[in-house]
Image: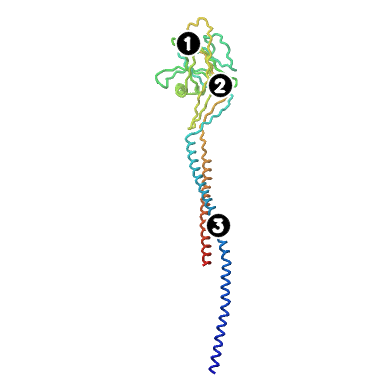
Amino acid sequence: MIRQEASSSYQELSDDVEHIAVNAQPSEEQDEDQEDAGSTILPVLDNTASVHFSKSCLKNVFSVILLFIYLLLMAVAIFLVYQTITDFREKLKHPVMSVSYKEVSTYDAPGIALYPGKAELLTCKHHYYDYIPPLVNPGQPGEIECTTQRINYTDPFTNQTKKHAVVVEGPRDVKKRELVFMQFHLNETDQDFSAIDYLLFSSFQEFLNSPNKSEFMKDCESSYSSWKFSGGFRTWVKMSLVKTKEEDSRETVEFRQEISVVNYIEQRKNSGGDQLFFVVFEWKDPFIQEVQDIITANPWNMIALLCGIFLALFKAADFAKLSVKWMIKIRKRHLKRKSQVLNHIS
């Protein structure tokens, strides 16, 4: 009986060992299959990793190149900002002179201030179409058809010398080529050279309306240049007007002249050393030259340019920041994949 129980237990133990052996055999086969599969899959994983690595390298290189390009563009933009501000400051310091011409049919009649000294005004007439008729009685008093004013005032430069001026209304109608012809006579001069001074100012009407004509003439003499015309000649003065607008919005008037001198052929008998003066005043052309200083720097254009440059700078900085973040992300992803592959291989 005891023998029978021992044989039965031995039989059960042998059955268990066989069952374990049978079960262990497929697990070993699975491990071998997995190792084979791993050996067959591993090269594929290595190829994909190398492909991903090459792509990420190219992307990184391309991102670095783009980053350098945008940094270069930012440097150029900063240089443009500096250059724009510098040019604007230079243009503010050096305005450009603008010259324009305004055509008129009639001028405001200028004032002609003459300083004859001992000479006497014989005739003064307005003629048209650039024609002066021959003199009938040269050296003799004739008609004075011009509007004239005689005035005495103190020299503005010395404040001691008394000056006597004959102020004559100048030509007005430029289309009809109006001119003013004057004749002076000087008796028995003891000078080697004889001449009469004159100056031009912008408006004869302002002179008439001035409450203090002496002060008006002093201001004119201190503001305008004076010229001379000589005896024994016919002096032809062609005037042109230049208006200049100052920086403080004041307007100044300047006369420019073209003077031609023609010899007067003396035909009088027994002149006795008398000296004759002939002068003609006429407008050169119907154009008034207007001069104005213009600042070419436009602040609105500069502000718009600076806004565009700063916008480009901010966009470039934003792109650079995104590029750096993207590169860091790609780098982390590459390291993660590399660690996964190494773990799998191990």
Q: Nearest the camera: 320 or 119?
A: 320
- What is the x, y in percent for residue 22? 58, 80
Residue labelled with disc 1: 186
Q: In whole angstroms, how far apart are the C-alphas of marks 3 and 2? A: 85 Å
Residue labelled with disc 3: 54
Q: Nearest the camera: 134 or 154?
A: 134
Q: Nearest the camera: 150 or 330?
A: 330
Around disc 2, counting alpha carbons within 10 Å, would you say few (fewer than 14), some (14 to 19), or many (20 or more)? some
Amino acid type at mark 2: Lys
Residue labelled with disc 2: 284
Q: Quadrant of the N terminus?
A: bottom right
Amino acid type at mark 3: Ser
In this picture, is 66 found above or below 2?
A: above
Q: Indicate how the structure is coloured in the image.
A: rainbow
Task: Pick whichever of labels 1 and 2 is earlier in the sequence.
Answer: 1
Task: Pick whichever of labels 3 and 2 is earlier in the sequence.
Answer: 3
In this picture, is 257 found above or below 305?
A: above
